[in-house]
Image (tube, rainbow, N blue to C red):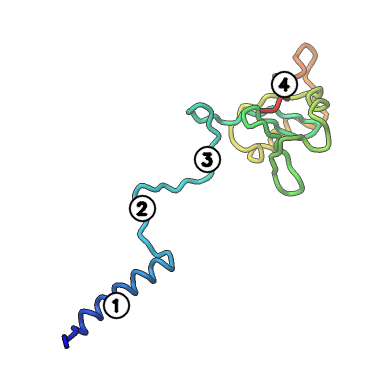
Amino acid sequence: MKKINKAGIGRIGVLLCTTVAGALTGCVAPRADVAYVETPVYVENGPVVEPEYVYYPAYEVYYSRHTRQYSYQQGHSWVSRPEPPRVSANVMLASPSVRLDFHDAPASHHAAVARQYPKHWAPHAGQHNREEGHDQTRR
């Protein structure tokens, strides 16, 4: 009968148990070729496109032509949706609007924008009703 080296079996057993335990618990080294990114910025044909907003003071609603989303306050939170709140898009398009020159979230600027363009704001005589409307066609 051959003698079995108990120390060799012990090392193999420990190595095997460690490998199985690592595989079962998901403890593996991260891959170098994997990158973790946050929510992507809206991209169109390569370059980053920042949203531009049209503001409708009567409804306190912002519209981004790039994302085709309406942003507005709902309770204490800001939401972005494909449809405006409480009114049809056609009715909103007929109301006075102003194009804004910021490119980040409307929530960051709303207090100042609402002071400058109150709910009953209208352009002065001789000015256009709104800078630019938006296309209602769906993709």
Element type at mark 4: loop
Q: Nearer the viewer, mark 4 or mark 3?
A: 3
Disc nearer the start of the sequence (4/1): 1
| Figure quadrant of the C terminus | top right
* Residue at the spot of label 1: 13
The quadrant in which residue 138 appears is top right
Q: Foreground residue, 61 or 36? A: 36
Neighbour tally class for label 3: few under 14, some 14-19, many 20 plus, Cα within 10 Å: few
Q: Foreground residue, 48 or 46? A: 46
From mark 1 to mark 2, how far is it between C-alphas? 27 Å
Three-letter amino acid code at the position of disc 3:
Pro
Three-letter amino acid code at the position of disc 1:
Gly
Q: Foreground residue, 86 or 115? A: 86
Q: Nearer the viewer, mark 1 or mark 2?
A: 1
* Residue at the spot of label 2: 31
* Residue at the spot of label 3: 40
Q: Nearer the viewer, mark 4 or mark 2?
A: 2
